[in-house]
Amino acid sequence: MKPVVQEEVTGCGIASVAALAKVTYSKAKKTANQMGIFSEDHTLWSDTDYVRQLSRRFGVKLGKGEKPFQEWDKLPDCAFLAIKWHLENGKPFWHWTVFVRDNKEAYVLDPKQSLKSHKRKDFGRIKPKWFIEVML
């Protein structure tokens, strides 16, 4: 799976869906906007509904609910990961990424613009809070 880099500071959810759907950021953003989903909307990274709706539109099937992260080895082969989880005025926020395990290789696709490599294997530095299973 190839990473998709977010083109907006708040576009991590859109970019993560784009990576799973194997489309460009601009195509995912255009589709999201047509659905009334905009990266400027803070609920895109403080609620799972928009990412679930956009995933569904692209035919990406997700598991029900969010499951707490326990260990890297216990993750499914593909999952949305909520990292950098924190509270702002009592409301949770996070950064969307995608965990992938294929061909005995595991990595996290991180859409953050400023990264040198968007395919991360520095698991000790990544602190997931929870995940949503992706059915491939």
Image (cartoon, helix red, strand yellow):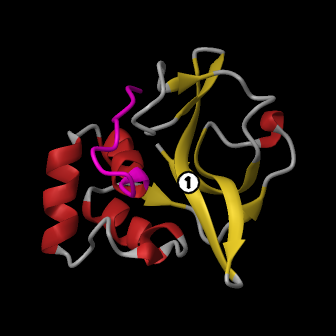
Above/below status of 31 relative to 7? below
Q: Is residue 97 left or right of residue 111?
A: right
Toward which corner of the image does residue 56 lie, by quadrant? bottom left
Q: Position of residue 120 (x, y in %)?
A: 59, 24
Left or right, 54 with reference to 76: left
Instruction: Indicate left or right for 80 with 60 as reference.
Output: right
- The residue where tag 1 is placed is 95
When the figure is inspected, residue 52 is found, relative to residue 36, above or below; the finding is: above
Horizontal and vertical percent position of residue 44: 43, 70
Q: Is residue 5 magenta?
A: yes
Residue 67 point in image, percent of width and height: 74, 63
Residues 112 and 14: in front is 112
Say above or below: 91 vs 93. Answer: below
In this picture, which residue range is highlighted in magenta? 1-12
- At label 1, the amino acid type is His
Where residue 90 appears, x then y in whole percent?
Answer: 71, 84
Residue at the image position 22 percent from the left and 53 percent from the top = 28
Q: Nearer the viewer, residue 58 or 51?
A: 51
Badge 1: residue crowd in 10 Å (few <14, some 14–19, many ≥20): many
Q: Does the stretch in magenta take in 101? A: no
Dot 1 lies on which element? Answer: strand
